Amino acid sequence: MNDTQPAGDGGMAGYYARRALSYERIYHKPERQADLRVLESLLPQRLAHRQVLEIACGTGWWTAVGAPACASWLATDLNPETMAVARAKPYPAGRVRFETLDAYALDALGERRFDAAFAGFWWSHVPLQKLGAWLRELHRRLEPGARVLFLDNRYVDGSSTPVSRRDDAGNTYQQRPLDDGTVHEVLKNFPDREQALAAVGPGVAQLEWTELQHYWLLDYRLP
């Protein structure tokens, strides 16, 4: 069966729901292990003692990495399938909470504010034409001086899924097969440093871009 389905924007939730039980295979690629150890050491250091809002926590791989050093951690995602995997992981007692939240509907957080935000592998799935507005909305949910970290993929020939097309807005897409035989078109952008900094805008402080072979990490503070 080769049932190709769109997973950009509207179909992304369905794609990740179907991939929930196999998602973490991506972290077992041998060529990525050195980079992952670096990121696993950086994340808890940079979010230590913070009240963290995590966007699109997925299966909780990075929740489990970052949470031990934080003051509190609210892990959010739209999919019950991926969050079920995330909830089953071990976390520091009383420190991590989970909540169903559409990343494009942050108003559901109400008046709650956080002094840190983290998103792993979410930036690359936000359409370029929506990214700036989405970042501004996220920033409105954070306290002055909040620390913001984004972690995502770099494109590496032979390790990354090939890009299958580019749309008129400059977004790139991949064709991703799943174990059930379906193939899904997934929006996946690979920004460089200049593109990421332009999206964040000039009003942030202490901005740091860490570029590894397979991943990048963007770290900054709000004024």
Image (cartoon, rainbow, N blue to C red):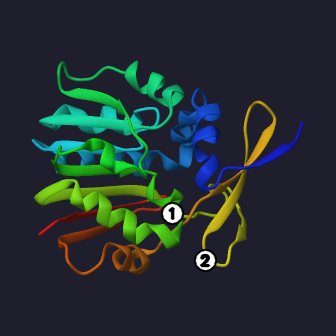
Nearer the viewer's eye, disc 1 or disc 2?
2
Q: Secondary structure at mark 1?
A: loop
Mark 1 vs mark 2: which is more N-terminal?
1
- Please identify the residue farthest to the right as the structure is shown: 1
The N terminus lies in which quarter of the figure? top right
Residue that label 2 marks: 169
User: Above or below — where is 52 with respect to 79?
Assistant: below
What is the spatial separation of the Cα atoms under label 1 and label 2, in whole angstroms? 20 Å
Between residues 7 and 209, which one lies in front from this camera angle? 7
- Is residue 214 toward the left or the right of residue 67 in the image? right
Residue that label 1 marks: 154
What's under tag 1, amino acid-wise? Answer: Arg
Question: What residue sits 39% from the left and 71% below the top?
Answer: 132
Label 2 crowd bin: few (<14), some (14–19), many (20+), radius 10 Å: few
Residue 80 visible in rendering: yes
What's under tag 2, amino acid-wise? Answer: Ala
Q: Position of residue 25 (x, y in %)?
A: 58, 35
Question: What residue sits 18% from the left and 55% below the top?
Answer: 142
- Picture quadrant of residue 19: top right
Are the residues tagged 1 and 2 within 8 Å (C-beta)?
Answer: no
Between residues 41 and 149, which one lies in front from this camera angle? 149
- Picture quadrant of residue 2: top right
Q: Position of residue 85 (x, y in %)?
A: 47, 24
User: Above or below — where is 216 with respect to 176?
Assistant: below
- Is residue 32 toward the left or the right of residue 137 in the image? right
User: Above or below — where is 181 with respect to 209?
Assistant: above
